[in-house]
Amino acid sequence: MTTASAPHVDSEVGPLRTVLLHRPGTELKRLTPRNNDQLLFDSIPWVDRAQDEHDAFADVLRGRGVEVLLLAEELVAALADARAHSAAVHTAVDRRRLGNELADSLRSHLAGVDAKELADVLMGGMTFEELPAAEGASLVRKMHHPHDFVVDPLPNLLFTRDSSVWMGDRVAIASLAMPARARETALLDLIYAYHPRFRTAGRAYGAHSAPVEGGDVLLLAPGVIAIGVGERTTPAGAESLARSAFADGIAHTVLAVPIAQDRATMHLDTVCTMVDRDAVVMYPAVRDTLTAYSLRPNGNGDGVRVDGPEPFLEAAAAAMGIDRLRVIDTGLDPVTAEREQWDDGNNTLAVAPGVVVAYERNVETNSRLEDAGIEVLRIGGSELGTGRGGPRCMSCPIERDAL
Ligand SMILES: NC(=[NH2+])NCCC[C@H](N)C(=O)O
């Protein structure tokens, strides 16, 4: 491993130094037409091609000097600690699903496997068919279909943005709203608690608090955080993240931004991402309608003042202390705009101010970004995108240089 500097992120666009990605693996092979909706994929990805696309994404980042950490490797490293190993077994065994007898036999099986094999089960799941034969006749085993899951797979691990968020030098483990993703945070929690590199990192926000997902959290500028509130992050989640950020001195203003409770706009970063210190790319259909409530400490203990709603762009510029937040005018007709929004055209990952990674398929959005002087690093995403997530969703920045 390269010599690690300290984790720290206080913007969306400061030069990216270290990022956490997840190269998709066995968990994607679990997707079928019967379970894909529940597992939050819109079709069945071609897994080998998804891996190739992901490797190319990681290479683009490495080519820009970014250190790429892969979740599977970090998880195996964390599980080398015996305490992490036994905590991990605990998170994998669902007694309500398995009943006591089968739960006990799964527990003793997993307790005996090495870190790599345990990590594979935690990420890729396990079916009844794969469960090593246990003594005794379990009704649960007899009555389940061999392809039912003993441990659910986590295909959305790919979207590392959502499960944890670095704010300043602290990491917040998210609280994921959808049952299909809930267990992801347990894996991130293990990595940050037991991996030698992260063991000392401070935490922000309580893991078991109201739902907050990282795709909703935008670090607009040092001290200014926007939080989308919609299908995933709840008002209570936004409020609790704001209180935690104020208490830790990470933010002076948090903007709570209502977004439509739709699959197409499940997170704020599906309609708006930052591409430069003072510029965003935004889905034209929300440009003039997005609003924000401003939260600030009211100077009275841990009291919080709530103002608004007012137009998002105005509230953001005021909190950031700039005249105007530039919106790159994609100028797209409504149908093209809707198509490219669905394909994560607005979901860019900045590697530096004015330099972003974007899916190549969003031809029109990308060319407007270039017209506006933004450098666009294009990646293929035909298979990666089947889970509805782009370069920002697939990356969790751990270290960015200050602006
Ligand atoms: N930050 C994001 N926009 N993440 C996209 C997550 C997509 C994932 N399939 C989900 O529905 O949860």
Image: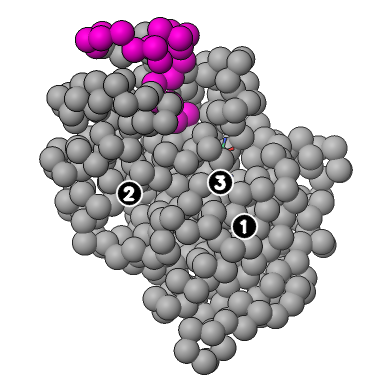
State the CA–CA distance, disc 1 to disc 2: 21 Å
| Ligand 1 closer than 8 Å to label 1 CB | no
Q: Which residues are magenta?
A: 133-155
Residue at 21% from the left image edge and 56% from the top image edge = 199
Farthest residue, direction bottom: 300
Q: Mark 3 is on which residue type?
A: Ala
- Label located before the other in sequence (1 or 2): 2
Question: How far across and how far down the image is residue 391, in percent?
Answer: 53, 42
Give the quadrant of the N terminus: top left
Please name the residue that numbered disc 2 is placed on.
Answer: 189
Please name the residue that numbered disc 1 is placed on.
Answer: 234
Residue at 45% from the left image edge and 71% from the top image edge = 244
Label 2 sits on a secondary structure element that is helix
Q: Classify 10 Å Cα crowding around label 1: few (below 14), some (14-19), many (20 and above).
A: many
Question: How far across and how far down the image is residue 165, in percent?
Answer: 43, 56
Residue 92 or residue 3, whichever sits in front: 92
Please say if the residues under marks 3 and 1 sit with CB atoms less than 8 Å apart.
yes
Please name the residue that numbered disc 3 is placed on.
Answer: 177
Relative to 16, residue 363 above or below: above
- Label located before the other in sequence (3 or 1): 3
**Majority secondary structure in the magenta region:** loop
Q: Classify 10 Å Cα crowding around label 3: few (below 14), some (14-19), many (20 and above).
A: some
Relative to 3, residue 256 above or below: below
- Label located before the other in sequence (2 or 3): 3
State the CA–CA distance, disc 3 to disc 1: 9 Å
* Residue 207 sits inside the magenta stretch: no
